[in-house]
Image (spheres, coloured by chain):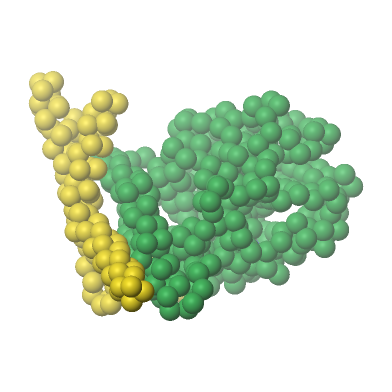
């Protein structure tokens, strides 16, 4: 477990930048702990009864009450609070990263004796589901390059993740998704054994990727992403942490690896940033890349509209519509297991896996039912996994 | 380089810039408010650092401020102050919710009463 370890690529914070992160964390928790319950009460006590009176039937989905909610001044503040804390977070981290960008670029250039490697493809086309808007409102998104060897987007993403998701997703290494993936693989596929070759699709800055190196030290680990600045940063980060990863800039829908090259192909929190046809093509590509008996597993946000109450759907709509993750709402209604079967996979399952802080032998955290009373299953991830 | 349209590091995200309030100006003002709230809390942490350096007999220089590392009890005290500041600032917003719930409840009570009276 690499939990709270600082690493040498992480942008540093000065006194006031650190104080900004503390403010935003307090504000974020305040919204979650004190404003969310009031917003939910507004749905239950004000808007649902009003809807029922108007429509003659109870409200069943967020779309039923959306208009009524958006007319409520408190709800307007709630929506806007979430938006401004997100925008201010990126703005603060950008100030901090830009202050030390020369140093970070310098570190990238000084990356020596590589354990792994970095293969970029400037001709790769950025898919429209990434280029049309900036995911989770990160200005410039994953791919914008303003200088040669630009790694700014990687520093921005890692800085934000390390500073703001500190207590939720595995400390400054932000690697709880990777450890949860490993727990899922060991729970569902005990016979797979230690894979020889692992591919992480949508690896971003390699936060999850490095857990696979740590778990399976003899495996060759590959990471692909569409964003060159992310991959440069990921490469410099991995080398400094003493982990060998082969990074390349590729679209997960069509990669240049040979048929049957991998024993395990995974992704963590990447599928929801694509779209429906791309998801099917990614599953097809996983099938092509795996040897017979190899395993595909995708870890996703634990949002399934069918399992959620009306307010929880409203919260998920915010992520989808305001935080520029439009496919969350789409993916959360799709039968991902059926799509995996369509790509030719067997032994397919989809469900929630409880997040683990590190691998605990014998623990089974996989369940198919949603949270009680339509609540979000916070602390879990939604998995779809299968055998080639 | 992939994006020819951007020449300086962008600070505003591509995509929806929604206004949740009736007036877009209110949305902008609330954005300013959150920034000012943050500035206030940052200043307050800085003042706290000054005081704690002073208590240790250390001269307040920018190097000393940067070198200062708050321990857990300092972090906790600061967290409490920040929470209090945010909570006071958000009281009028919470009051909007309370008023809406009260209004709805009295409407339903009234409706129920008039139905009950009809039935007598
Ligand atoms: C939210 S990040 C998840 C990061 C990482 N997997 C983790 O767990 O820390 C999603 C990543 O998926 C990448 N991505 C989205 N669509 C992709 C595609 N078609 N091919 C490769 N990468 C993709 C994005 O560029 C982004 O870096």
Residue A357 figure quarter: top right
Question: Residue at the spot x=53%, y=67% of the render?
Answer: A60
Residue for point 51% across, 73% down: A57
Q: Can residue B10 be seen at all in this image of the molecule? A: no
Give the x, y percent position of residue A244: 66, 36
Number of marks drawn: 0
Q: Quadrant of the C terminus of chain B?
A: bottom left
Q: Where, by quadrant of the figure, is residue A272 drawn?
A: bottom right
Say whether residue A381 is left or right of residue A255. left
Name the residue: 13% across, 20% down: B56
The shade of chain A is: green
> In this view of the protein, which residue sits in the foreground, A244 or A291?
A291
Placement of B2 over or under A119, stated as above or below = below
Nearest the camera: A21 or A363? A363
Q: Nearer the viewer, residue A68 or A262?
A: A68
Q: Which chain is yellow?
A: B
Q: Is residue A51 positioned above or below A172 on the image?
A: below
Q: Is residue A380 left or right of residue A161?
A: right
Q: What residue sits 22% from the left and 54% below the top?
A: B90
- Where is residue A306 drawn, in percent x and y? 61, 60
Q: Nearer the viewer, residue A115 or A188?
A: A188
């Amino acid at each position: 477990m690499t939990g709270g370890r600082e690493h040498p690529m992480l942008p540093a914070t000065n006194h006031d930048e650190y104080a900004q992160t503390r403010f935003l964390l307090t504000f974020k928790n305040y919204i979650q702990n004190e404003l969310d319950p009031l917003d939910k009460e507004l749905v239950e006590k004000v808007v649902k009864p009003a809807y029922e009176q108007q429509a003659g039937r109870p409200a069943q989905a967020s779309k039923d009450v959306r208009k009524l909610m958006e007319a409520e001044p408190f709800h307007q503040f709630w929506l806007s609070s979430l938006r401004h804390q997100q925008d201010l977070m990126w703005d603060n981290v950008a100030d901090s990263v830009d202050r030390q960008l020369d140093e970070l670029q310098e570190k990238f250039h000084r990356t020596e004796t590589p354990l792994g490697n970095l293969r970029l493809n400037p001709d790769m086309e950025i898919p429209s589901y990434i280029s049309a808007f900036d995911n989770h409102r990160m200005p410039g998104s994953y791919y914008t390059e303003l200088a040669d060897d630009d790694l700014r987007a990687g520093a921005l993403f890692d800085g934000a993740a390390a500073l703001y998701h500190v207590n939720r997703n595995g400390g400054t290494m932000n690697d709880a998704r990777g450890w949860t993936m490993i727990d899922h693989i060991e729970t569902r596929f005990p016979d797979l054994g230690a894979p020889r070759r692992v591919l992480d699709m949508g690896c971003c800055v390699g936060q999850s990727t490095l857990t696979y190196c740590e778990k399976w030290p003899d495996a060759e680990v590959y990471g692909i992403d569409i964003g060159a600045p992310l991959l440069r940063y990921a490469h410099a980060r991995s080398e400094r942490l003493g982990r060998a990863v082969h990074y390349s800039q590729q679209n997960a829908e069509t990669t240049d690896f040979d048929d049957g090259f991998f024993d395990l192909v995974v992704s963590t929190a990447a599928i929801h940033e694509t779209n429906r046809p791309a998801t099917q093509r990614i599953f097809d590509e996983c099938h092509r890349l795996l040897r017979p008996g190899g395993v595909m597993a995708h870890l996703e946000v634990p949002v399934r509209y069918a399992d959620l109450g009306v307010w929880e759907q409203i919260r998920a709509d915010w992520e989808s519509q305001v935080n520029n993750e439009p496919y969350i709402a789409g993916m959360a209604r799709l039968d991902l297991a059926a799509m995996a079967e369509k790509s030719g996979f067997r032994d397919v399952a989809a469900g929630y896996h409880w997040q683990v802080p590190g691998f605990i032998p014998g623990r089974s955290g996989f369940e198919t039912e949603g949270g009680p009373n339509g609540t979000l299953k916070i602390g879990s991830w939604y998995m779809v996994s299968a055998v080639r | 380089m992939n994006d020819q349209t951007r020449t300086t590091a962008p600070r505003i995200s591509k995509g929806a810039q929604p206004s949740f309030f009736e007036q877009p100006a209110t949305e902008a003002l609330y954005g300013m408010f959150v920034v000012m709230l943050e500035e206030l809390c940052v200043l307050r942490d800085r003042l706290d650092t000054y005081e704690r350096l002073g208590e240790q007999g250390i001269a307040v220089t920018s190097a000393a401020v940067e070198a200062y590392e708050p321990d857990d009890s300092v972090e906790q005290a600061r967290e409490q102050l920040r929470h209090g500041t945010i909570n006071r600032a958000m009281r009028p917003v919470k009051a909007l919710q309370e008023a809406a719930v009260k209004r709805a409840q009295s409407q339903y009570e009234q409706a129920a009463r008039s139905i009950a009276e009809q039935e007598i």
